[in-house]
Image (cartoon, grey):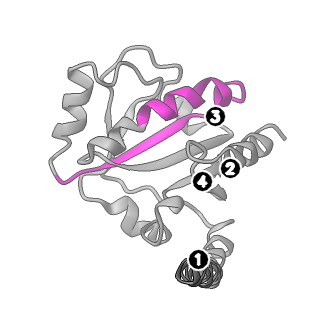
Amino acid sequence: MKQIYILKYFVLITFVFCIISCKKGSNNEIKPLRSVIEKTIGKKLVLPDNIKIYAPFSNYIADSSNIWNSEYRIYSRIDASCGTCIGNIKMWSKLIPEFQKYKVPIILIFHSDDRFELIKYFCESGQIEEFSFPFFFDSENKYAEMNEFMKINKNFETVLTDTNNTILLTGNPTTSTDIMNLYIKEVSK
């Protein structure tokens, strides 16, 4: 009986220690990320010249001139060699109606290790049925090189910009309702 109490006490102590350790580690990880965000907001997003348009569908709600002349834009970098990453396009599709109220295009910029074969296959086979904006292919992965903050953390691969490509917000609204609400608040001003 005494051994059970000792075991329970040991498990409780271990659990508390783990919580305290995790909490300390997360604060240390948040500080550098906060610094990156502060340095990124207000900075210009740079687009490389080598980006190619890939338009596998016919239902686009905006052409390239509408996209580039819009008051706000959402850019998100996606790994086109990753099936799970490509599958996340469906989550972006669900957000389009909300952002379309404010005429905000969603610009998905793909990089790839397989010459974009997987994304093309997903489109041609119907695994991605429709997307309301063309896709943009960055064959040399210059987009991430020119916007180095994106390499720090996946959360920085999505940004909201104004018409001049000045970064207003960073974070992925498909993964966080708080970020989604921030994006909507900004574009509805």
Residue matched to label 2:
179
Between residue 25 and residue 122, name the one nearer to us.
Answer: 25
Q: Over which residues does the magenta segment extend?
A: 89-113
Callout 3, which amino acid? Answer: Val
Q: Toward the viewer: 133 or 19?
A: 19
Q: Is residue 93 magenta?
A: yes
Residue lying at the far top of the rendered structure? 59
Q: Residues within 10 Å of mark 4 (few under 14, many from 20)?
A: many
Q: Is residue 63 above or below residue 5?
A: above
Foreground tag (4 vs 2): 2
The residue pinned by badge 3 equals 104
Residue 84 lies in quadrant: top left
In the picture, the disc for residue 165 is: 4
Q: Earlier in the sequence, mark 1 or mark 4?
A: 1
For badge 2, the amino acid type reads Ile
Judging depth in this view, the residue of 50 and 36 nearest the camera is 36
Please tell me which of labels 1 and 2 falls first in the chain.
Answer: 1
User: Mark 2 or mark 4, which is nearer the start of the sequence?
Assistant: 4
> Would you place residue 120 above or below residue 169 in this image?
above
The numbered mark, 1 or 3, whose residue comes first in the sequence reads 1
Q: CA distance from mark 1 to mark 3?
A: 55 Å
The numbered disc on residue 8 is: 1
Residue 120 picture location, percent across and down: 21, 32
Give the x, y percent position of residue 40.
62, 69
Q: CA distance from mark 1 to mark 2?
A: 40 Å
Secondary structure under tag 1 reads: helix
Q: Residues within 10 Å of mark 1 (few under 14, many from 20)?
A: few
